[in-house]
Image (cartoon, helix red, strand yellow):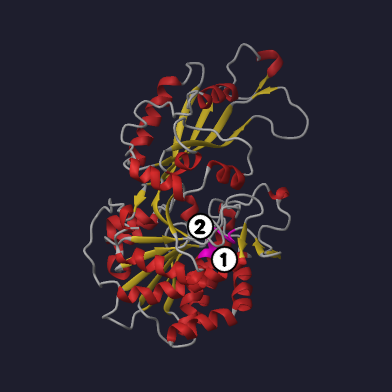
Amino acid sequence: MSLSRALSYATAHRSKFLKELKDFIRFPTVSAQPEHAVDMKRCAVWLAANLRQSGLEDAKVIPNGSYPLVYASWRRIPQRPTVLIYGHYDVQPAEPLGEWQSGPFEPAVRGLDLYGRGSSDDKGQMFTQVKALESYLRTSGRLPVNVKCLFEGGEEIGSPHLSRFVVRNKGLLAADVAVISDTSILGSQRPAINYALRGALGLELEVRGPKHDLHSGDFGGAIHNPLQALAEIVASLHDDRGHVAIPGFYRSVRRASQHERAYLAQAAPSDLDVLRSAEAQNGWGETGYSLYERTTLRPALTVNGLVGGYQGPGGKGVIPTRALAKLSFRLVPDQDPSEIDRLFREHIDRITPPTVRSRVRTLAGAKPALSDLRHPAIRAAALAYRKGFGSSPVFLRSGGTIPVVDTFQEVLGVPTVVMGFGLPDGRIHAPNEKLHLPTFYNGIATCIWFLAALTAVQKHPSRRKEMRGMSLEEV
């Protein structure tokens, strides 16, 4: 009866949930931009208050490095399992602002979609979990299982302070399973569970030349332009087959089995699907792999930004003193971010022309993660998707990175269920990010079912430091 009442409450309070989500999105919680530090703290306070209003206990804001954590729990059934719910309230920068049809922090509903930065990544998806908890607590006054919530404000900058917090607070965060809603499914009626996430490494490469900007007429052709040198270095980081041209880069890459590749070829998006989601005409990358495999099974190096020289209107005849590239690696098992960082630095030292100087700065790193599909919590998630969406989920890899997944496995020894509710056309990290509202509401129902299904999960399952098994045959 508590399950039925929770589902009815969620349906009856959709307008309330939407209003609260709009309030959530209005906070410009851009963790990469220090000028939003006050907005981050205000949002954390708002989120803690919302958790208390939803019926959770001991909701509080915890200082943690640059931006605070938000913690809450409900622990009244010692004999039942405990689930740790993770999410992040920080968002990507909204630039370029001129490409938004409505303000990035002025949420707007157009058709069946809610537009705004963070609507899908990750405020909207995180809210599916929070509102599922509210649906139980505001009807039955209790949850089917014990719950702990941990929401951070630094995921989009690599969660630089979270691992230390987890290590120092193992008792506070002890659980039997963790769950994260921060990925995409295949479509509004095509749910998916992600069993693998790529790791990440963010770097800045700076090239310096003359001590000050030079007149391009007086010195052009005589002094090596740092912008040109940087462009030459960046262009050399890939070969003509799409491979990353850093010696040793692929040394530790774990190759997928033929069985897994065959399964993904049948279940995963086709090349056409990927191009349609990207709104691109042609693909690019490592030969011998589908577009989906290039973004999930294989590692990648991406140029995220190039800065240098005059950027204003009109022209300026100048050789700039410096140029900067922002680069990101996406890594697969068993690549280690620290090892790739070392290989990259050594390679840059070798190829930097003697006419300029280079410097590498590490921004963030996160290890790749795998989940064991044989864990009973995965089966609970599959059942929940069937009930919430009316169709069974497929099992996919994700090309994205969620740093905390590896931390939970290594430090807490708990597996993580990654059950997302974003859509491929959600424009996450891009202008006009959006959340499909029918999928949002189905996501809340799915989370309600998931909590109920977790009651069958054995408390304190055997804990392993690394979840290597795929067991796709059992799916």
Q: Residues within 10 Å of mark 2 (few under 14, many from 20)?
A: many
Q: Which residue is mark 2?
A: 185
Q: Give the Cα separation between the discs numbered 2 and 1.
A: 10 Å
Expressed as whole percent of the image width and height from the top left, the position of residue 387 reads 46, 72
Q: Residues within 10 Å of mark 1 (few under 14, many from 20)?
A: many
Expressed as whole percent of the image width and height from the top left, the position of residue 424 reads 56, 53
Q: Amino acid at mark 1?
A: Thr
- Give the main secondary structure of the magenta stretch: loop
- Whether residue 48 is visible here, answered yes or no, is no
Q: Dot 1: what SS? A: helix
Vertical side of 132 occupied by 325: above or below: above
In this view, the residue in front, 403 or 260, is 260
- Whether residue 143 is visible here, answered yes or no, is yes
Specify the quadrant of the image occupied by residue 365.
Answer: top left
Q: Dot 2: what SS? A: loop
Give the residue displayed 27% in from the left and 81% down from the top. Answer: 78
Viewport quadrant of the C terminus? bottom left
Whichever of labels 2 and 1 marks the residue nearer the N terminus, that label is 2
